[in-house]
Amino acid sequence: MGMAMYAVFWLVDQAIGLYVWALIIAAVFSILVSFNVLDTRNRFVWAIGDFLFKITEPALRPIRNFLPNLGGIDISPMILILLLYALRIFLWTTLWPLVAG
């Protein structure tokens, strides 16, 4: 039971880590598109942008709705990354000791 639960916790931790990287890549992608470094008329670039938008927007939208308008600055990815790191810390320092016994 212990190794199986450890594997589940490890898998959740790795999924959170991958999602953090997806958020960082989406933010960098957005900056590159806004400065016309990447052309979204290219089908491959558009597909990558669409994929990143679809996986990050559902988590970022509630944060954006909560935040005040800061002009052209979007800090919602940074806030979500901090929340995800807090979740990782909570997962290993609070939940894992309870489950592991």
Image (tube, rainbow, N blue to C red):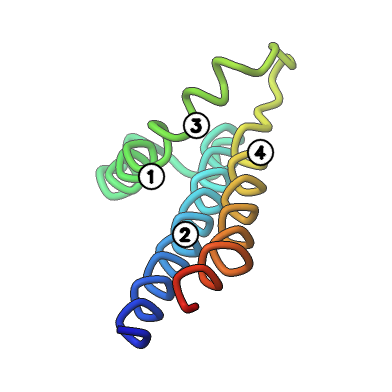
Relative to 41, is 72 on the left or the right?
Answer: right
Name the quadrant containing residue 32.
top right
Q: Nearer the viewer, residue 2 or 76?
A: 2
Question: x%, y% of residue 25?
Answer: 51, 53
| Mark before the other along the chain sequence, 1 or 2 | 2
* Residue appearing at x 49%, y 78% in the figure: 101
Task: Classify the position of the N terminus by image quarter.
Answer: bottom left
Q: Which residue is mark 4?
A: 79
- Mark 3 vs mark 1, foreground winner is 3
Q: Can you tell which of label 3 and label 2 is closer to the viewer?
A: 2
Q: Secondary structure at mark 3?
A: helix
Residue found 64% across the figure and 53% down from its top: 86
The amino acid type, in three-letter code, at marker 4 is Ile
Image location (x, y in percent) of residue 24: 56, 52
Give the Cα distance between marks 3 and 4.
9 Å
Mark nearer the N terminus (3 vs 4): 3
Does the residue at mark 1 contact the one at mark 4 (Cβ under 8 Å)? no
